Amino acid sequence: MEAAVVDAGMIMNIETRDFAGRTSVLLLLLGLASGLVSASPQAQPAAAPSRSVQPVLNLKALAEPLQDLTAEERNSVDAAYRLIRQKKHLLALTSLTSLTETNPKNSAIRVLRAYVLLELGNITGSLNDASFAEESGGRSAYRCWFLAQVAYLAGDKPLCRREIGHISHNPTYGPKAEKLGRKLDGAK
């Protein structure tokens, strides 16, 4: 199967103008229709820059909000996750953006989309979705940890510190948060 690939700079421009909802999908489709997309099996998105902090997806930690989805929507999430694992982030973004239209407050979908946006180099869009995910639903140490990492990458020190504070005593994420806090304090 051939994948459609857009230059990461174009995605960044599209996504930061209006990354939430129908407009961004429409803009993406307009990009497809206007020939900004190349379709070839050899085409690969630009590699993400090397980062000292690399958020990792934890589907187990996202399981609760995923239960709120219909069976068809869960199948779409599964398909998007497979695309993420295959590094087909643009296709995953399209699917996840569609899911956010029907489930705007589902924190799991927002975390998945934040991860994809980060992989595509859109740190601002990733930070927005990660923030929205952290504010949605019940308390979640994983969502705080994810947001802390994205905030660090975005250079938002106050937000990163706030999230580190939320999880500092968590047995799973606390030690990692301490280490990130040391990096943050050492960062200029």
Image (cartoon, grey):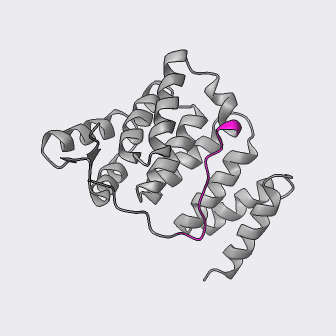
Q: Position of residue 75 (x, y in %)?
A: 50, 23
User: Is residue 38 placed above or below 100 in the rendered structure?
Assistant: below
Q: Position of residue 159 (x, y in %)?
A: 64, 61
Asked if residue 84 lies left or right of residue 64, the reply is left
- Classify the position of the C terminus by image quarter: bottom right
Name the one closer to the observer, 143 or 132.
143
Examine the residues drawn in magenta and state their main secondary structure.
Answer: loop
| Number of numbered tags placed on the structure image | 0
> Residue at coordinates 69% horizontally, 53% vertically from top-left?
145
> Residue at coordinates 34% horizontally, 61% vertically from top-left?
46
Residue furthest out toward the top: 71
Q: Position of residue 10 (x, y in %)?
A: 27, 56
User: Is residue 76 placed above or below 38 in the rendered structure?
Assistant: above
- Classify the position of the N terminus by image quarter: top left
User: Is residue 114 placed above or below 97 in the rendered structure?
Assistant: below
Residue 52: in magenta span? yes
Name the one closer to the observer, 139 or 90.
90
> Residue at coordinates 36% horizontally, 45% vertically from top-left?
90
> Residue at coordinates 41% horizontally, 47% vertically from top-left?
89
Residue 139: in magenta span? no
Asked if residue 30 lies left or right of residue 88, the reply is left
Using the rendered view, name the quadrant where residue 48 is placed.
bottom left
Q: Position of residue 67 (x, y in %)?
A: 64, 23
Which portion, as a residue range, is magenta? 51-60
Residue furthest out toward the left: 34
User: Is residue 177 placed above or below 71 in the rendered structure?
Assistant: below
